[in-house]
């Protein structure tokens, strides 16, 4: 064991540098808050990083997450909904526990901390390049996929066909509705937005995500699929895809578990041998199949 | 290098060390039922108990309970944030080989953790030989041994008539006894490193599913109370929780020991729990120690100190778990 500095004189100095205290969040300001869903449970926060140095250092990959930190309340891991190419950061937060409830009480101008980016992200610059990309999302799991989609559209020529299948319970539960309208008008993207049951004022697709995925039947040739949603949706989405030749190696999932450190140390988020926070949250489905079902 | 020192020299050293930081060791303490060996600050070497394992491991010196990650204070509309705690200079006397080894094992997951690294740097571990293994010990089965010096900066051995033999292994150890000696630290003595435990390889090469599906878990989980005592006493259980504490306009963010035996450890805010049953949690604790950790870092996350065996209220015995898993692996082949 090689730790030779018995009486290190520079401890205070080391501790105050954010690089050496990974638990120090960067200071952010809430610039804008949008209530996304009709039930008011989903809010989107647009943040700006206050410190210039931290702002220039920040660099994330679509699919990564960060800890949103409210001093006195705690921290919560949330997927980064903004593309790395956008100004500022964006997070869409479902109100579920102590910290997310406190987050929902924030107003524009308030301060909060962000610790990250954490985790691995989707392979947008590696395995996905040159391939057709199928994005399948259910409910509020669309967040990091929005980040991914914006990134793909920015570097559109690097990818093949882009197909997006997105579903929510009702029209009012769909996230990013303005952007959905914009994307629907593009001809370099095939967008399929669906709701679970027919409702007034909705003339789009109706049906669960697995059903629509079966109808769209994206070709598995030279393609990857990114699927985020409730476990039940993922479970039923796979059979129709497998039927037309999709293999687990082509499918990326994003797992979530309770997390504390986000650094692969505290032990909370392990799913068998892997830490969702550090080894994931993005895994190939073929990897997930080998893990115990502890997510 | 090696030196022989007198008890009074050591006491003088302890007194001077106490001016800069803390000096601790296992000492005998009266209790309601008799006595116990507990970690406490010491004033003289005579207080240190060498022939009996302390009830708790030394982990609280490297994982302070709690450890302050940062402090905050309301200022206007925002907060002023100060960095967390600074490690305390610490010298531990009489650390047993199993406990000293736990520092090395815990360093593996914590290799990038500045808090743990600073605590390690601020702590000098003066170990001892294990002359008196307990009936629940099994250090040899997990890669340690009573003569192991892994994790020790120095080793102290009573040699009778008020004198002590000190062996120095690291710069830190040397610096501690500098006043009493000159020269270089000795190379690691022979016999320090023990053999690879026989069970390590079969468990590492075994597919996870064969261990995960073993029927030993149902049997263990039936008795387990999920009380968590094993995790708190275990020198190599290193999981923690992070919480904020507030008082008035200021507060602190702390991390402190947590236990995978508790349902809340994994429960999502939605109520969903990936490890909903006792069986899931018992299995996770043992597989982490015997499979997940070795697969990642190459060694069992266990030093064989036997504390979990000794203190478990329902008599769950990790040695039996290891044996059963080995059988499961063998029948698989």
Image (cartoon, coloured by chain):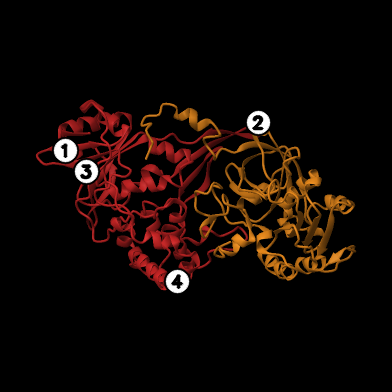
Q: Residue, x 79% and y 63% (percent of image)?
A: A218
Which of the two marks, 3 or 1, is nearer to us in this view?
Answer: 1
> Label 1: which residue?
B164
Q: Chain of mark 2?
A: A
What is the secondary structure assignment of the residue under circle 2?
loop
Which of the two marks, 4 or 1, is nearer to us in this view?
Answer: 4
For mark 2, does the 10 Å Cα neighbourhood hold few (<14), some (14 to 19), or many (20 or more) residues?
A: few
What is the secondary structure assignment of the residue under circle 3?
loop
Question: Of marks 4 and 1, which one's residue comes earlier in the chain?
Answer: 1
Which of the two marks, 1 or 2, is nearer to us in this view?
Answer: 1
Chain in orange, by letter, is A
> Label 3: which residue?
B48
Question: Of marks 4 and 3, which one's residue comes earlier in the chain?
Answer: 3
Q: Which color was chain B given?
A: red
What is the secondary structure assignment of the residue under circle 4?
loop
Do discs 3 and 1 belong to a common subunit?
yes
In the rendered image, the residue lying farthest to the left is: B161
CA gap between label 4 and label 1 equals 50 Å
Which of the two marks, 4 or 3, is nearer to us in this view?
Answer: 4
Contact flag, marks 2 and 3 (Cβ < 8 Å)? no
Q: Chain of mark 3?
A: B
> Label 2: which residue?
A51
Which quarter of the figure is the C terminus of chain A placed in? Answer: bottom right
Do discs 4 and 1 belong to a common subunit?
yes
CA gap between label 4 and label 3 equals 44 Å
Residue B214: numbered disc: 4
The x, y position of residue A264, in whole percent, is 52, 49
Residue B277, visible in the rendered structure: yes
Question: Of marks 3 and 1, which one's residue comes earlier in the chain?
Answer: 3
Which of the two marks, 2 or 4, is nearer to us in this view?
Answer: 4
């Amino acid at each position: 064991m090689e730790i030779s500095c018995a009486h290190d004189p520079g401890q205070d100095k080391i501790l105050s540098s954010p690089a050496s205290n990974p638990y120090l969040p960067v200071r952010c300001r809430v610039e804008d808050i949008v209530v996304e869903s009709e039930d008011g449970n989903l809010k989107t926060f647009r943040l700006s990083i206050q410190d210039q140095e931290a702002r220039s250092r920040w660099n994330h990959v679509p699919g990564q997450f960060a800890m949103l930190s409210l001093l006195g309340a705690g921290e919560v891991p949330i997927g980064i909904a903004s593309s790395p190419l956008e100004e500022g950061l964006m997070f869409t937060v479902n109100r579920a526990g102590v910290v997310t409830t406190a987050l929902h009480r924030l107003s524009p101008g308030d301060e909060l901390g962000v610790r990250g980016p954490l985790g691995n992200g989707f392979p947008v610059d590696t395995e996905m390049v040159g391939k057709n990309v199928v994005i399948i999302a259910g409910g509020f799991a669309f967040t990091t996929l929005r980040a991914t989609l914006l990134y793909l559209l920015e570097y559109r020529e690097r990818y093949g066909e882009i197909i997006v299948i997105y579903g929510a319970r009702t029209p009012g539960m769909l996230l990013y509705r303005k952007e959905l309208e914009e994307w629907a008008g593009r001809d370099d993207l095939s967008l399929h937005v669906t709701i679970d049951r027919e409702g007034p004022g909705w003339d789009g697709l109706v049906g669960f995500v697995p059903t629509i995925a079966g109808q769209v039947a994206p070709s598995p040739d030279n393609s990857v699929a990114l699927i985020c949603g409730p476990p039940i949706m993922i479970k039923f989405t796979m059979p129709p895809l497998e039927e037309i030749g999709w293999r687990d190696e082509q499918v990326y999932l994003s797992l979530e578990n309770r997390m504390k450190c986000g650094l692969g140390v505290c032990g909370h988020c392990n799913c068998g041998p892997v830490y969702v926070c550090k080894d994931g949250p993005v895994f190939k489905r073929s990897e997930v199949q080998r893990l115990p079902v502890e997510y | 290098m090696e030196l022989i020192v007198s008890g009074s020299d050591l006491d003088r050293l302890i007194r001077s060390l106490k001016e800069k930081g803390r000096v601790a060791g296992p000492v005998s303490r009266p209790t309601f039922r008799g006595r116990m060996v507990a970690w406490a600050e010491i004033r003289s070497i005579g207080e240190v108990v060498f022939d009996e394992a302390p009830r708790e491991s030394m982990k609280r010196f490297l994982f302070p309970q709690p450890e302050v990650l940062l402090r905050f204070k309301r200022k206007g509309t925002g907060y002023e944030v100060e960095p967390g705690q600074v490690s305390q200079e610490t010298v531990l006397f009489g650390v047993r080989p199993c406990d000293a080894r736990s520092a090395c094992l815990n360093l593996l997951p914590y290799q990038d953790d500045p808090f743990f690294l600073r605590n390690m740097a601020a702590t000098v571990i003066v170990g001892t030989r294990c002359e008196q293994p307990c009936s629940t010990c099994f250090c040899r089965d997990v890669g340690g041994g009573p003569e192991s010096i892994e994790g020790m900066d120095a080793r102290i051995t009573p040699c009778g008539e008020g004198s002590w033999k000190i062996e120095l292994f690291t710069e830190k150890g040397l610096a501690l006894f500098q006043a009493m000696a000159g020269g270089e630290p000795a190379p690691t003595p022979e016999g320090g490193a023990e053999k690879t435990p026989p069970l390590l390889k079969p468990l590492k090469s075994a597919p996870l599913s064969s261990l995960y599906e073993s029927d030993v878990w149902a049997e263990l989980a039936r008795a387990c109370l999920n009380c968590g005592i094993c995790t708190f006493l275990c020198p190599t259980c290193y999981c923690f929780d992070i919480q904020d504490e507030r008082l008035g306009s200021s507060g602190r963010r702390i991390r402190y020991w947590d236990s995978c035996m508790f349902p809340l450890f994994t429960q999502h805010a939605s109520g969903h729990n990936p490890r909903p049953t006792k069986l899931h949690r018992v299995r996770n604790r043992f597989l982490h120690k015997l499979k997940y950790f070795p697969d990642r870092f190459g060694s069992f996350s266990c030093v064989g100190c036997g504390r979990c065996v000794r203190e478990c209220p329902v008599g769950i015995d990790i040695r039996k778990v290891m044996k059963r898993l080995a059988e499961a692996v063998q029948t698989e082949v």
